[in-house]
Amino acid sequence: MIQFDQKIYFYALVLLPLMLLVFLGVQLWKKKTQNNFSDTALLKKLAPKKSTFKAPFKFTLQILGVTAIVVALVNPKAGTKLETVKREGVDIVFAVDVSKSMLAEDIAPNRMEKAKRLVSEIINELASDRIGIIAYAAQAYPQLPITTDFGAAKMFLQGMNTDMLSSQGTAISDAIELATTYYNDAAQTNRVLFIVSDGEDHSDGGAANAVSKAIDAGIKVFTIGVGTEKGAPIPLKKKGIVESLKRDSEGEVVITKRNTETLIEIASAGNGIYIDGENTANAVAIIKEQLNQMDKMAFEAKQFSDYKDQFQWFLGLGLLMLFLDQIIWEGKTGWISKLNLFNEKENETAA
């Protein structure tokens, strides 16, 4: 298994086609200039030591050297073996509201980005727990199944937005019902569901039944509120520019407010608590305290161990290629000329 520490350095590989263009341009310029000076046969007599293959050979060394150094900067790591390890933790599912109301900017920069930041900060505080992610609006859709890969969780989290689901509305009940299918019955871990939302619910009271099913499945339901009770309009943007505000059927500007009461009711019925997400640090501290109070159950997880840095091999290879490029002379090498690999002496005699 290979991991890359600094993938951003892969962008440096754009130097390779640029180097090729420069090399080809220089070679064409040299050839044109030489042809203007004299014909090919006379040039061979004037510069008998000039090699035709050294320039591309040296350029190849440069390309290999730069490529190897870029790979060294990325710092590939190799996992030498796959182990089954025992871990203790809690199974946590985040159900994130991606309805249009999450675009409201009553909390900076908007409710959607605030929700993603909250979940990301919570993940940063986790140790050996497992996590899953659900996105929901009028319907709920799985984003990431239960996993120990926090890096993948953050990647999926950052890709979430209010345009990812075509059906709009807010059906918290669907998110809760989908969450009950996430947990592995074979692993008897404590089960936690965090609903991150502004509390708007268009599921016609179905959340109560969904919470009841979650309790029967051994799931504790917590709610995290984003937004303010004062509320704000929903901006409709195109390319980051506000074009208009969302309006209802009567043409009035829609003001969306955080429904704290609904979130408190869901958390209370789900044996959890409601957490105000306005202050990220306070919210994360409360959640961390709640999770620490739960019993950690053991489960097995397979993971690659003994990851070792491999950058030194690529760095050494890159420096070697560049060193060879510097010490190799562009003219013909004496001992290679003696080998007469390309019948150069016969060609010169014939000429």
Image (cartoon, rainbow, N blue to C red):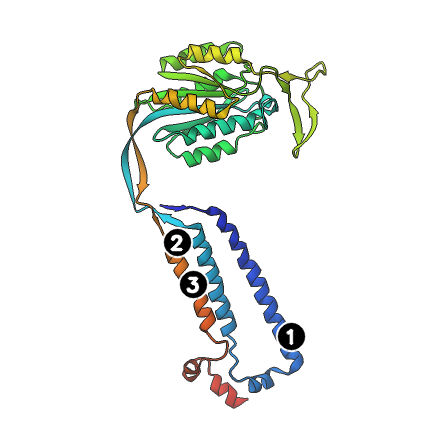
Q: Which disc, if any, is residue 311?
A: 2
Asked if residue 182 shows in the view, the reply is no
For label 3, the residue is 319
**Residue 48 on image: x %, y %:** 53, 85
Left or right relative to 145: residue 12: right
Using the image as rendered, state which of residue 93 and residue 293 is in the foreground. Answer: 293
**Residue 217 on image: x %, y %:** 36, 16
Q: CA distance from mark 2 to mark 3?
A: 12 Å
Using the image as rendered, state which of residue 162 and residue 125 is in the foreground. Answer: 125
Left or right relative to 232: residue 226: left
Do labels 1 and 3 touch, CB within 8 Å? no
Q: Kindly state the secondary structure of the residue where label 2 is placed.
A: helix
Crowding at mark 1 (Cα within 10 Å: few <14, some 14-19, many 20+): few
Whichever of callouts 2 and 3 sits on the residue coming sooner in the sequence is 2
The residue type indicated by label 2 comes to Phe
The label nearer to you, 2 versus 1, is 2
The residue type indicated by label 1 comes to Lys
Q: Kindly state the secondary structure of the residue where label 1 is placed.
A: helix
Q: Residue at x 54, y 27 (%)?
A: 114
Crowding at mark 3 (Cα within 10 Å: few <14, some 14-19, many 20+): some
Do labels 2 and 3 touch, CB within 8 Å? no
**Residue 130 on image: x %, y %:** 37, 29
Using the image as rendered, state which of residue 262 and residue 41 is in the foreground. Answer: 262
For label 1, the residue is 32
**Residue 205 on image: x %, y %:** 51, 9
The residue type indicated by label 3 comes to Leu
The label nearer to you, 1 versus 3, is 3
Q: Residue at x 49, y 27 (%)?
A: 118
Q: Does 198 sit above or below residue 148?
A: above
Whichever of callouts 2 and 1 sits on the residue coming sooner in the sequence is 1
